[in-house]
Amino acid sequence: MRKTILIVLLFFITGIGNAQKKGEPDRISKLFAGYETLEMTMNNFKYFAGEIGYKINPRKQLRLVIGEVKLSEKHLTGKWRTAGVDGNNVEGYFRIYELSYDNFFDWKKNWYWSLSTGYVNDQYEHMIMNEMKIDNHSPTIGGGIGWQKRNLFGIKHLYVNIALPARFYLNPIQSREWGNTTIRHHFLVNNIWLFIGFNA
């Protein structure tokens, strides 16, 4: 269902772009939407993470990141593991709604800084000791940097966005030990997002 909604949304946005007047070839593309590929690849594409944004002008844009990801034990313990867990036998779930205001240093060179606010829900569960569970909800504030490229590989309407946000949890998770596993203190948490999608 989530994939169907995303596909419909992308076709809608692409359709808006194709409806652009021929007399305005240099008009700034306003709307864009992308699918997050890095986090989703590491977690077997369960369930969904993506962004939708609006370009205010050449140097400013707004983005809403929506994510609902089942965190696999492999991701939590592997080479590219999250910073939240140190040890084995833990799986989890991560939900995020994060609104970011981006300001490009130089819009032609694609780099930007951002300020953000949002909401996260982190869940962890020990796979052997069933009584070990965390279900934490928190508002967040934060910032980050990113790099966005439109017309990727010369393909019109195709874009990529690499975002490195960091956020402060206003309701942090306190560090705790689960056997040989440590659930680390969640106060300042970062991500690496890789969005690929279409701009109108």
Image (cartoon, helix red, strand yellow):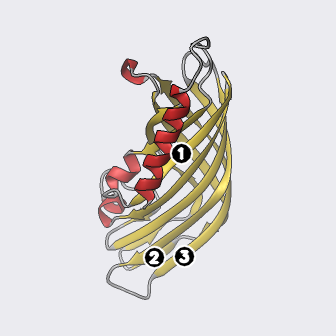
Label 3 sits on what residue type?
Answer: Asp
Task: Identify whether 174 is placed above or below 163.
Answer: below
Q: Which mark is residue 177?
A: 2
- The amino acid marked with disc number 1 is Glu
Secondary structure under tag 2 reads: strand
Give the percent coordinates (x, y) of residue 14.
49, 34
Please name the residue that numbered disc 3 is placed on: 135
Q: Position of residue 64 (x, y in %)?
A: 61, 47
Residue 82 visible, this orientation: no
Q: Mark 3 and mark 1 in contact (Cβ < 8 Å)?
A: no
Place of residue 55 in the rendered image (x, y in percent of width and height, measured from the top left): 65, 30
Q: Earlier in the sequence, mark 3 or mark 2?
A: 3
Left or right: residue 3 compared with residue 63:
left
Question: Which of labels 3 and 2 is toward the front?
Answer: 3
Q: Nearer the viewer, residue 167 or 197?
A: 197
In primary-sequence order, the first of circles 1 and 3 is 1
